[in-house]
Image (cartoon, rainbow, N blue to C red):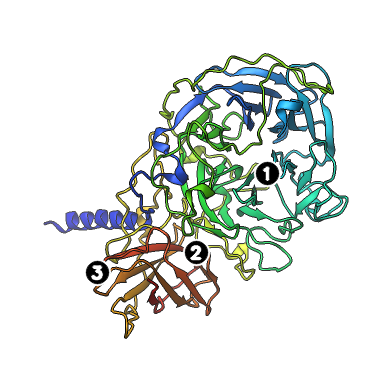
Amino acid sequence: MPKRLAATLAAILSAVIVSAALIVTRPTAAGAATGGFDFTRAQIATMGLRVPWGLTFLPDGAALVSERDNARIVYVRPGATPVVAATVPNVYPAGDGGLLGIAVSPTYAQDGWVYAYIGTTYDNRVIRFRLGSSGTPQVIFGGIPRGQYHNGGRIAFGPDGMLYVSTGDAGTSSNAQNLNSPGGKILRMTPDGGVPSDNPFPGSRVYSYGHRNVQGLAWDEAGRLYATEFGQNTWDEINYIQPGHNYGWPVCEGMCGNPNYTNPLMTWYSADASPSGLAYANNTLFAAALAGMRLWAVPVADGYRAGPPVAELVGSQGRLRTVAVGPDGWLWVTTSNREGTGPSRPNDDLIIRVPPVTGTPWPSVSPSPSPSAGPSLSPSAGPSPTPPGDTSPCPSPSSDPAPSPSPSPSPSPTPSPSPSVSPPESPSPSDSPSPSESPDASPSPSPSPSPSPTPSASPSPSASPCPSPSPSPSPSPSPSPSPCPSASAGTSPSPVSSPARSPSQGPSPSASPCPSPSPSPSPSPSPSDPRSCEATVRFFQATVAAPWGEVTVRNTGPLPITSWKISFVVPYGLSYVNLWNGAYGAPGTTVTAGNPAWGGHLQPGASVSVTFSIGWHSGTVQPPAVTCTVVS
């Protein structure tokens, strides 16, 4: 074979191997799908909206959607043309302000209240009104700082019946640490705007502070509150919100390492996220990403642990603003392509619906809870993340003291057939909008998103992992350790997005990361128990993709095993290790993890590989010896 042809073939083969090494996917059980939803059967519920921002549901199953720039609230049923339910007065749309979040009262059947977060010429405020009556909306809380950017704007009733309001710092970062300012906070108030007696700061609506720009709120089945937050130009976050906690802005962005501030549960570079809306179902948080143009699914447990995130709808539908679980059990996602910060298509903006999966749920971050622990996703009796409310809309807000019944568009007994999402042509990377909605946010290189450790000791944002075109996926089993991890054959393209369920869009073939050489595995035989296992760890260090680690565990005994645990000392060439169970370690410390729920059962000779996050900057890192112990 001519030398030039041989060299060309070798280069192509190397590129294929490198790509395979960088695309690592989680195992997909039969009937499983991301977070309990089947993205291969996504549908377009409606189209032609203009910058939809807030999304809530009426008790008859219809959605109310706020349009930011024209101050309209529209009534949406899948497959039907949207109907204008109201136009909210005194809204001043400028920058990222306007008509933002909406919510219906938990006692909508009795009082008929609809709540909205609006920007006026001089402040942001929360109002309420009734659909179907004329009149001036009632202001229940005003004086929230407004700016060209960082206006927050998500509102939602919590499981306690209180109204939670996310606000931004309005471009003045000192607002976030000032407890006398409502800017840069998550506020908690009674439905009429009063101060709850059990708020963390007596006489104040402040629930948590130190926020830059929170635009997503969601609760799990245990009542734990999570929030998405825009960073400045480096780290975007998901936080587990606890009353009275300080989340660090502007002192910290991302991980802080200061015990006075609460670290995030998950961080991304802004180019991969710019997260707005947030929803929870099936032990999974779903975050809608604007600049990242994808829907992130993040397994969570106990408020403190997060598993590797998985990206859906990657690039195919443009910027994603809001996500919610509807009373039909489907996942509803809105696009935000007509706001002037990125390309738009003729049918924009859309609402996409993703059906629930029947069958085995996808692997969770911890041993799976009982099926009754999470919300049901049956289409006939699905979970309603928004509070129960009742009746239907008509045009025009009002502040009348009594609810006025109004006719609603006749509901169809079952959702109208909707077209499946055959995406318009995906925007090219060069058309991507800026990572953040604020002018001070500039595109950044993108390392893989990583579950953020609870311990405060952590690298500062300036010591961030290497850039990545897109984030690392969840763990994937492998029959045996190999020189480089191979792409899982279990993932298939979703009609919803060109690179569906692809946690990575693929690195440059020239990246050529190779795993560090592994030391001899360290078996742990027991004199009284013939069961045994061995484990090795590898670190994948690349300059165009986020670095990650991989542990491979093999059953070396004559009997099956059902659970195992590993431990190793974090080498000094890394800045941190964050294992799949949330265990976090700095250099020189020991980290320990048990098997994920899906990866414990191994037949004799079988092996499984699990990926995890690492911090690495340069140089070769020698992998440490790993201790493997059979638990059962």
- CA gap, disc 3 and disc 2: 25 Å
- CA gap, disc 2 and disc 1: 27 Å
Q: Which mark is residue 605?
A: 3
| Residue sitting at x 19%, y 56% | 4
Q: Which residue is mark 2?
A: 581
Q: Secondary structure at mark 2?
A: loop
* Amino acid type assigned to the residue bearing label 2 in the image: Asn
Q: Residues within 10 Å of mark 1 (few under 14, many from 20)?
A: some
Q: State left or right for residue 391 relative to residue 501.
A: right
* Amino acid type assigned to the residue bearing label 1 in the image: Pro
Q: Which residue is mark 1?
A: 159
User: Residue 64 is drawn in which quadrant?
Assistant: top right
- In the rendered image, residue 545, in percent from the top left (x then y), is placed at 44, 57
Q: Residue furthest bottom?
A: 527
Q: Point out the image quarter for the N terminus.
A: bottom left
Nearest to the observer: residue 611 or residue 168: 611
Q: Residues within 10 Å of mark 2 (few under 14, many from 20)?
A: many
- In the rendered image, residue 319, in percent from the top left (x then y), is placed at 55, 36
